Amino acid sequence: MAHNLKLSDHFSRDDFACTCGRCHKEFRMSLGLVGIVEHLQHRFKQKVTINRAYVCEEYSKSLFASNKDYHHMGKAVDISIANIPLEDIFKEVEAMPEVTGIGFIPQTQQIHIDLRDKDREIWLEERDEKLTLSPQKRQQYNLN
C-alpha cells in the first residue's frame, strides 16, 4: 500500500500511521477524525501537527498497558498547532459536538481528540495524571 496516500487536502496516510518503527507504519483511522483535523487546519490557517494517531497493538500495549485504547482503534489523535495558544485549540475542539473525548495536556502542549462511542469526557492531564476538568482548572488554564 502506498504510504503517501492522501486522505484530505492537507493530510496523508503517513500523518496518521503508527510511528513505533517496528510495524512498518500500520494504519487505521476514522475518516471523521481526519475531517476534524482538516477543519482545524482551515480554521487556524496553520499546520496541524499530529503527534500521535494510530498505534499498533504492540506499541499500544507498551504505551497504555492495553490494546483497547482509542489510538489503537483508529479513533484518536494528539495534536498541536504552532503559534496557536493551546486554550484556543481546546475551545474550538470543545465546540465540535462530534468530538466525544477531549484531553487538555499543557505539559506537552497537546490536545487529545477522540471519537469514543459513549458520553463525552473532557479532562486535564497534569504530571501524567488524568484529572476532571473542574471549573477551577478551567479558570486556571483560561478555558472558559
Image (cartoon, grey):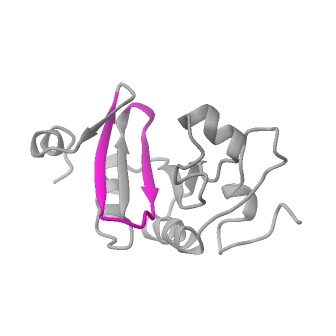
Q: Nearer the viewer, residue 98 or 49?
A: 98
Residue at point 75% right, 71% down?
Answer: 6
In the visual, does 53 lie left or right of 134? right
Instruction: Give coordinates of residue 135: x percent, y percent.
Output: 11, 46
- Whether 102 is drawn above or below 95: the answer is above
Location of residue 22 in the rendering, given as x and y in whole percent from the top left corner: 82, 38
Spot occupied by residue 108 in the image (x, y as percentages of width and height): 45, 34
Residue 33 included in the magenta stretch of the image? no
103 relative to 114 in the view: left or right: left
In the image as oriented, which residue stretches furthest toward the right? 1
Q: Going by the image, does 17 lie left or right of 3?
A: left
Q: Is residue 118 magenta?
A: yes
Q: For residue 31, what is the image quadrant?
A: bottom right
Residue depicted at x 36% and y 48%: 103
In depth, the one of 134 and 64 nearer the eye is: 64
User: In the picture shown, does residue 18 fall above or below 92?
Assistant: above
Q: Give the position of the C terminus as an image quadrant.
A: bottom left
Q: 37 or 97: which is nearer to us? A: 97
Q: Going 48% across and 72% down the picture, which residue do you hit?
A: 39
Q: Quadrant of the N terminus?
A: bottom right
In the image, what residue occupies the spot 63% across and 64% down? 29
Q: Magenta residues?
A: 107-126
In the depicted structure, whether residue 109 falls above or below residue 34: above
| Position of residue 136 measured from the top left corner of the image (x, y, whole percent) | 10, 40
